[in-house]
Amino acid sequence: MKFFAGLILALIVSHPSSGQSQTQLLADPGFEKQSWDLKDKSMAFYSSEAAKNGTSGLRLQDDSPEDKAVALSEYQPIHGGKQCELRGFVRVKSRVYIELEFFDAEKKKISGKLSEGFPHHVKGSLLDQIDTLGQWQEFSVKCQVPPESAFVRVFLHTYSKGTGWSADFDDLSLTQP
Protein backbone atom coordinates (compact mmCIF):
# COMPACT_ATOMS: atom_id res chain seq x y z
CA MET A 1 0.00 0.00 0.00
CA LYS A 2 1.42 3.35 -1.00
CA PHE A 3 1.38 6.18 1.45
CA PHE A 4 0.45 9.64 0.28
CA ALA A 5 1.10 12.04 3.13
CA GLY A 6 -0.49 14.88 1.21
CA LEU A 7 -3.89 13.20 1.66
CA ILE A 8 -3.70 13.52 5.43
CA LEU A 9 -2.18 16.98 5.56
CA ALA A 10 -3.32 19.31 8.29
CA LEU A 11 -2.18 22.88 7.83
CA ILE A 12 -2.39 25.43 10.59
CA VAL A 13 -0.96 28.93 10.41
CA SER A 14 0.14 30.79 13.55
CA HIS A 15 -1.33 28.42 16.11
CA PRO A 16 0.66 27.52 19.23
CA SER A 17 1.67 23.90 19.67
CA SER A 18 -0.18 21.64 22.05
CA GLY A 19 2.31 21.88 24.89
CA GLN A 20 3.46 18.24 24.60
CA SER A 21 7.16 17.60 24.98
CA GLN A 22 8.64 17.68 21.47
CA THR A 23 12.02 16.52 20.13
CA GLN A 24 13.70 18.92 17.66
CA LEU A 25 14.89 16.90 14.67
CA LEU A 26 16.64 19.56 12.58
CA ALA A 27 20.37 20.07 13.11
CA ASP A 28 20.38 23.65 11.76
CA PRO A 29 16.87 25.11 12.21
CA GLY A 30 17.94 28.77 12.09
CA PHE A 31 20.45 28.38 9.22
CA GLU A 32 23.22 29.75 11.46
CA LYS A 33 25.50 26.72 10.84
CA GLN A 34 24.80 26.90 7.11
CA SER A 35 24.66 23.11 6.83
CA TRP A 36 21.77 22.72 4.38
CA ASP A 37 22.37 21.25 0.92
CA LEU A 38 21.91 24.17 -1.52
CA LYS A 39 21.65 22.91 -5.11
CA ASP A 40 22.50 26.18 -6.88
CA LYS A 41 24.09 28.74 -4.60
CA SER A 42 23.14 31.59 -6.92
CA MET A 43 19.45 30.80 -6.32
CA ALA A 44 19.48 29.29 -2.80
CA PHE A 45 21.77 31.03 -0.33
CA TYR A 46 22.27 32.18 3.24
CA SER A 47 21.80 35.87 3.90
CA SER A 48 21.59 38.23 6.85
CA GLU A 49 18.78 39.96 4.93
CA ALA A 50 16.82 36.68 5.05
CA ALA A 51 17.15 36.36 8.84
CA LYS A 52 14.16 36.98 11.06
CA ASN A 53 16.34 36.20 14.09
CA GLY A 54 20.07 35.65 14.47
CA THR A 55 22.60 36.44 11.77
CA SER A 56 21.53 34.13 8.94
CA GLY A 57 18.39 33.00 7.15
CA LEU A 58 17.78 31.10 3.92
CA ARG A 59 16.76 32.88 0.74
CA LEU A 60 15.36 31.17 -2.35
CA GLN A 61 15.57 33.55 -5.32
CA ASP A 62 14.72 31.93 -8.64
CA ASP A 63 15.46 33.90 -11.78
CA SER A 64 15.90 30.88 -14.07
CA PRO A 65 13.16 29.83 -16.53
CA GLU A 66 14.40 26.20 -16.52
CA ASP A 67 15.71 25.44 -13.03
CA LYS A 68 14.42 25.91 -9.51
CA ALA A 69 16.03 27.07 -6.27
CA VAL A 70 16.44 24.08 -3.94
CA ALA A 71 17.50 23.69 -0.30
CA LEU A 72 17.51 20.32 1.50
CA SER A 73 18.04 19.68 5.19
CA GLU A 74 20.32 16.88 6.30
CA TYR A 75 18.71 13.43 6.69
CA GLN A 76 17.20 13.34 10.15
CA PRO A 77 16.11 10.22 12.05
CA ILE A 78 12.35 10.01 12.58
CA HIS A 79 9.93 7.53 14.17
CA GLY A 80 7.57 5.97 11.63
CA GLY A 81 3.87 5.84 12.42
CA LYS A 82 3.90 8.95 14.61
CA GLN A 83 2.90 12.50 13.85
CA CYS A 84 5.46 15.21 13.11
CA GLU A 85 5.23 18.96 12.81
CA LEU A 86 7.23 21.41 10.72
CA ARG A 87 7.02 24.99 11.97
CA GLY A 88 8.88 28.11 11.08
CA PHE A 89 8.76 31.55 9.60
CA VAL A 90 8.48 32.40 5.92
CA ARG A 91 8.49 35.74 4.13
CA VAL A 92 6.93 35.02 0.76
CA LYS A 93 7.26 37.23 -2.26
CA SER A 94 5.81 34.63 -4.66
CA ARG A 95 5.20 30.89 -4.92
CA VAL A 96 7.47 28.58 -2.93
CA TYR A 97 7.08 25.01 -1.73
CA ILE A 98 7.74 23.23 1.55
CA GLU A 99 7.92 19.45 1.44
CA LEU A 100 8.80 16.66 3.81
CA GLU A 101 10.37 13.66 2.11
CA PHE A 102 10.41 10.35 3.98
CA PHE A 103 12.99 7.57 3.60
CA ASP A 104 13.34 4.00 4.84
CA ALA A 105 16.33 2.68 6.86
CA GLU A 106 18.45 2.39 3.67
CA LYS A 107 17.54 6.02 2.77
CA LYS A 108 15.35 4.92 -0.13
CA LYS A 109 12.60 7.47 -0.72
CA ILE A 110 9.14 6.32 0.32
CA SER A 111 6.52 7.10 -2.31
CA GLY A 112 4.38 10.09 -1.54
CA LYS A 113 5.44 13.24 0.21
CA LEU A 114 3.92 16.05 2.18
CA SER A 115 3.77 19.22 0.12
CA GLU A 116 2.26 22.65 0.49
CA GLY A 117 2.89 25.72 -1.60
CA PHE A 118 2.96 29.34 -0.43
CA PRO A 119 0.58 30.37 -1.95
CA HIS A 120 -0.62 26.93 -3.05
CA HIS A 121 -1.64 26.92 -6.70
CA VAL A 122 -3.82 23.79 -6.64
CA LYS A 123 -5.77 23.66 -3.40
CA GLY A 124 -5.77 27.41 -2.84
CA SER A 125 -6.27 27.07 0.92
CA LEU A 126 -3.02 28.77 1.82
CA LEU A 127 -3.57 31.79 -0.38
CA ASP A 128 -6.32 32.90 2.00
CA GLN A 129 -4.15 32.27 5.08
CA ILE A 130 -0.91 33.85 3.84
CA ASP A 131 -2.45 37.26 3.42
CA THR A 132 0.53 39.59 3.67
CA LEU A 133 3.06 38.81 0.99
CA GLY A 134 6.48 40.24 1.80
CA GLN A 135 6.02 40.04 5.59
CA TRP A 136 7.14 37.33 8.02
CA GLN A 137 4.46 34.80 8.84
CA GLU A 138 4.59 31.73 11.03
CA PHE A 139 3.50 28.43 9.50
CA SER A 140 2.86 24.98 10.87
CA VAL A 141 2.40 21.75 8.92
CA LYS A 142 1.48 18.51 10.70
CA CYS A 143 1.37 15.05 9.18
CA GLN A 144 1.39 11.37 10.02
CA VAL A 145 4.81 9.85 9.28
CA PRO A 146 4.63 6.73 7.07
CA PRO A 147 5.14 3.63 9.27
CA GLU A 148 8.22 2.41 7.34
CA SER A 149 10.02 5.78 7.71
CA ALA A 150 13.41 5.97 9.39
CA PHE A 151 14.59 9.34 7.99
CA VAL A 152 13.11 12.63 6.85
CA ARG A 153 14.41 15.62 4.89
CA VAL A 154 12.91 19.08 4.58
CA PHE A 155 12.82 20.07 0.92
CA LEU A 156 12.34 23.79 0.18
CA HIS A 157 12.07 24.87 -3.44
CA THR A 158 10.62 27.25 -5.98
CA TYR A 159 8.54 26.34 -9.00
CA SER A 160 10.68 25.10 -11.90
CA LYS A 161 9.01 26.85 -14.82
CA GLY A 162 9.13 30.60 -14.49
CA THR A 163 11.13 33.38 -12.92
CA GLY A 164 10.77 35.71 -9.98
CA TRP A 165 9.85 33.11 -7.34
CA SER A 166 11.32 34.04 -3.97
CA ALA A 167 11.01 33.53 -0.23
CA ASP A 168 13.00 33.80 2.97
CA PHE A 169 12.98 31.12 5.70
CA ASP A 170 14.15 31.23 9.30
CA ASP A 171 13.75 29.43 12.63
CA LEU A 172 12.42 26.14 11.26
CA SER A 173 11.51 23.42 13.70
CA LEU A 174 10.77 19.80 12.83
CA THR A 175 9.48 18.03 15.92
CA GLN A 176 8.00 14.74 16.96
CA PRO A 177 6.46 13.88 20.36
Image (cartoon, rainbow, N blue to C red):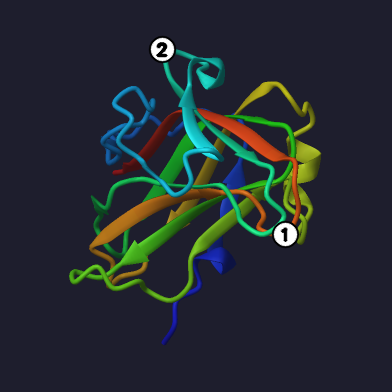
The image quarter in which residue 96 lies = top right
Three-letter amino acid code of the residue under disc 2: Gly
**Point 45% across, 32% down: residue:** 17
User: Which is closer to the viewer, label 1 or label 2?
Assistant: 1
Identify the mark nearer the N-term, 1 or 2.
2
**Point 56% across, 65% down: residue:** 6
Residue 162 in percent (x, y) is at: 76, 53
Q: Is residue 152 left or right of residue 63?
A: left
Return the residue at label 2: 54
Quadrant into which the N terminus falls = bottom left
Q: Nearer the viewer, residue 139 or 81?
A: 139
The image quarter in which residue 160 lies = bottom right
Residue 119 in percent (x, y) is at: 74, 45
Q: Say what secondary structure mark 1 lies in.
A: loop
**Point 41% across, 12% down: residue:** 54
Three-letter amino acid code of the residue under disc 1: Lys
Q: Nearer the viewer, residue 36 or 28?
A: 36
Q: Residue furthest bottom?
A: 1
Q: Is residue 78 above or below residue 25?
A: below
Quadrant into which the C terminus falls = top left
Q: Is residue 160 above or below residue 3?
A: above
Q: Where residue 161 is drawn, which disc sits there?
A: 1
Q: Say what secondary structure mark 2 lies in.
A: loop
| Badge 1: residue crowd in 10 Å (few <14, some 14–19, many ≥20) | few
Q: Is residue 115 above or below residue 129?
A: below
| Badge 2: residue crowd in 10 Å (few <14, some 14–19, many ≥20) | few
Residue 176 in percent (x, y) is at: 31, 45
